[in-house]
Image (spheres, rainbow, N blue to C red):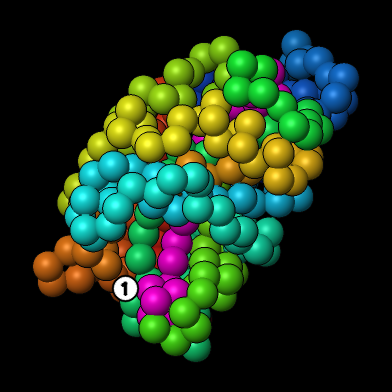
Amino acid sequence: MRIARVVTTTNEICWGRMIDERTLNPLRGDLFSAHEFRNEVVEAREFLAPVDPPNIFAIGLNYRRHAEEQNAPLPERPLIFIKATTARQHPGRPIVLPRSAPNEVDFEAELAIVIGRSVKNVSEADAFSAVLGYTCANDVSARDCQKKLDKQWARGKSFDTFCPLGPWIVTRDSLDPDACPISTRVNGETLQQSNTNDLIFSCRMLISYLSHQFTLLPGTVILTGTPEGVGMFRNPPRYLRPGDRVEVEVGGIGVLANTVASED
């Protein structure tokens, strides 16, 4: 099942169960508690990020070939960082190159896990019971802030619009998260192409590990890492520029597309 959050043609915002690419059965109740889908049909005018997460946890260096392209040893445990929730951006809306750091903004295709219930210290065996579903994400990163100017990741990962999510959630019963093709296209050119079977730490392990560090609240988003092919490690480097169109595709979910614009 696919669950989307949309602006309808009558200018209402709602979650709904998708019937086809533009129509939905709207949800009555709360997505993260008791709810049902009404028999009526609404039409989507615009797709929104499927959740407004209370936290965005992200994992660095979690694909084997991404480690290889930068000659980095495989991590012994997940490398966790946090993106500001204000970085969340909707499908179709622009990634904005910040005035203070516009020159080395990079793309990162990621499978995102959406947590469905509050959970703490969950075992790997039970980890998927906490999952509502999965969506596409772009972990946009200002590399000059991350690597040279700040030498830590908070600012470079958290500028406004630096976490596009969507276009919808595929429920956990409809997807094997550890066997999904994943790719990025910029202006139609494929720059990242891999599969989540190259993950160092599986989705089940990440959920369990994070829950032993933090309480995972309903709506929490976990970005599971990006594969090889990011702009920083290309020769020459390939960074985003105004007018670019970035498409992140995860097999079994769909395509998250955003344009790029200058803050100026």
Residue at 59% across / 43% down in the picture?
222
Between 149 and 17, the one nearer to me in the picture: 149
- As drawn, is 218 to the left or to the right of 19? right
Residue at 39% across / 76% down in the picture?
147
Residue at 35% across / 66% down in the picture?
106
Instruction: Give how far across and how far down residue 9 sits, in percent.
Output: 66, 39
Instruction: Give how far across and how far down residue 142 sits, in percent.
Output: 43, 73
- Vertical placement of 103 versus 6: above or below? below
> Is residue 142 a member of the stretch shown in magenta?
yes
- Vertical placement of 254 versus 81: above or below? above
Instruction: Give how far across and how far down residue 1 sits, in percent.
Output: 58, 16
Between 129 and 242, the one nearer to me in the picture: 129
* Circle 1 residue: 241
> Is residue 1 a member of the stretch shown in magenta?
no
Q: Which residues are magenta?
A: 127-147
Between 77 and 41, the one nearer to me in the picture: 77
Where disc 1 sits, the SS reads: loop
**Badge 1 density bin: few <14, some 14–19, many ≥20, Cα 10 Å:** some
